[in-house]
Amino acid sequence: AAYQKALALRERLLKGEDFAALARATSGDASVAQNGGNLGWFTALQLVYPFETAAYRLGKGKISLPVRTGFGYHLIRVNDRRAAQGKVK
């Protein structure tokens, strides 16, 4: 049922609905009320493996199929990419 719900939400996104508004209205994650589903910039090994794998395989502006992690199902949209910023010493 959760997978089917995620697929239906993806269809709405593909038709042009606002990602942040839809995330706020439907997500079970309390932090989404603040961030609208925007995780900001991240690099490898910062998030759970299935999530990162899907995000790195997506093209800019694309929306993933539902991705299952230990936290549930997720839809991922890649807003932008940038080169690695290096490490702070």
Image: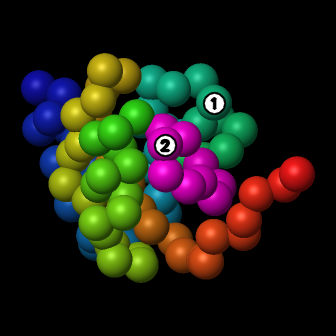
User: Residue 61 at x, y = what percent?
Assistant: 41, 77
Q: Residue at x 30, y 52 (%)?
A: 53
The quarter of the displayed image where residue 86 is located: bottom right
SS at circle 1: loop
Give the class, few, some or many, for how many residues have Cα within 10 Å of label 1's Cα (few <14, many ≥20).
few
* Residue type at the position of mark 1: Ser
* Residue type at the position of mark 2: Leu
Which residue is at the front of the view, 37 or 50?
Answer: 50
For the question of whether residue 64 can be seen, the reply is yes
Magenta portion: prevailing SS class: loop
Which segment did they paint magenta?
Answer: 39-47
Report the label total.
Answer: 2
Q: Residue at x 59, y 24 (%)?
A: 30
Residue 46 part of the magenta-drawn span? yes
Identify residue for label 1.
Answer: 31
The quarter of the displayed image where residue 24 is located: top right
Q: Establish if 48 lies above or below 64.
A: above
Q: Establish if 82 lies above or below 8.
A: below
Cβ atoms at labels 2 and 1 below 8 Å apart: no
Identify residue for label 2.
Answer: 45
